[in-house]
Amino acid sequence: MYSTLAIKTNSKKSGRIIGTHQKLDKIAYKIVQKNLPENIKFPDIKTILLFEGMGGPDGLKRKSPGKDEPMHFIIPDKDDGKLFQIIKDHQYNLRKALEKGDEVRAAFEAAWMAHAVTDGLTPAHHFPLEETQKELMTEKEFIKIFGVPIKGIMHGQNTLETLRNNWLYWGANGYMSKHIGFEYGVAITLAAIPPSRVIAKIPEQDFKHNDLKDSFYSSLERVASLNMYDKFRHNGWTTDLAFETRDILLPEIAKAIAKCWLSSIPKEQK
């Protein structure tokens, strides 16, 4: 999902215009504030957002493409547990940071945890794009856009195969083109509505008995059941898809972030 469209890698305005992760984090933070125990000092949202955009996972891909990139993809009906393990690791580290009162580390873990949750619940990330990249792209080939290295050339054994591979990936209906198109539609939908429209009403009981695994997978199941990305790949953006994004997808992601953050609060302090 979009967290930055900045051309410069050190841009301080990263995510201000199209910053889906940042906007969802802000909405989730409002939910957390209403349900946070009085004795817990959760990092403020400004500090959390320092670790989004160019300071987050998307920034890492811009700074060093192809090197230790976090791949937040999950195939709901063939889940290998790798993405959830990433989220679980962030939960452990966030809990430890909260116990120590380390606000900076807590903010880092909260931001990266939220990023993984958001990507994991984004329908475009339910398509095996990572496997497709490995099939079509060599690791050492890069192109540069505005001086920034971008992984993007899919070399074949000959010129014809190279052209074919790149069309399959970047063409009008290519794998990456569709991926970007879906995420852009979500970003525009979120930018066009007030944050209050995305704040889901969550029963207090849901927070008292809040389990990380249950929270994430229940949200994943609900999102996956809509088959939004399949609809998009076949029909493009439709009014029905926009309404599903506004009324179901975005509130579900914001709720999941909030519940995952709250599940990280040290048990003795709840």
Image (cartoon, grey):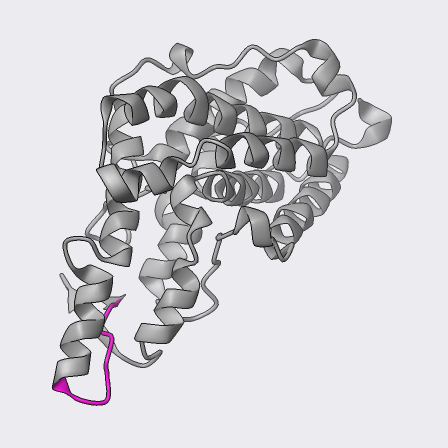
Q: Is any part of residue 38 visible from this angle?
A: no
Q: Position of residue 104 (x, y in %)?
A: 57, 41
157 is within the stretch colored magenta: yes
> Which residue is depicted at the point 55% across and 46% down?
76
Please, which residue is most extreme toward the bottom here? Answer: 157
Q: Quadrant of residue 236?
A: top left
Q: Position of residue 18 (x, y in %)?
A: 26, 34
> Which residue is depicted at the point 32% across and 42% down?
2
Q: Position of residue 127 (x, y in %)?
A: 42, 52
* Above or below, 22 relative to 131: above
182 vs 78, left or right, is left
> Which residue is depicted at the point 23% across and 27% down?
238
Q: Quadrant of residue 31?
A: top right
Q: Nearer the viewer, residue 93 or 248?
A: 248
> Which residue is depicted at the point 47% across and 21% down?
251
Q: Nearer the viewer, residue 134 or 72?
A: 134
39 is within the stretch colored magenta: no
In magenta, the rendered stretch is 151-159
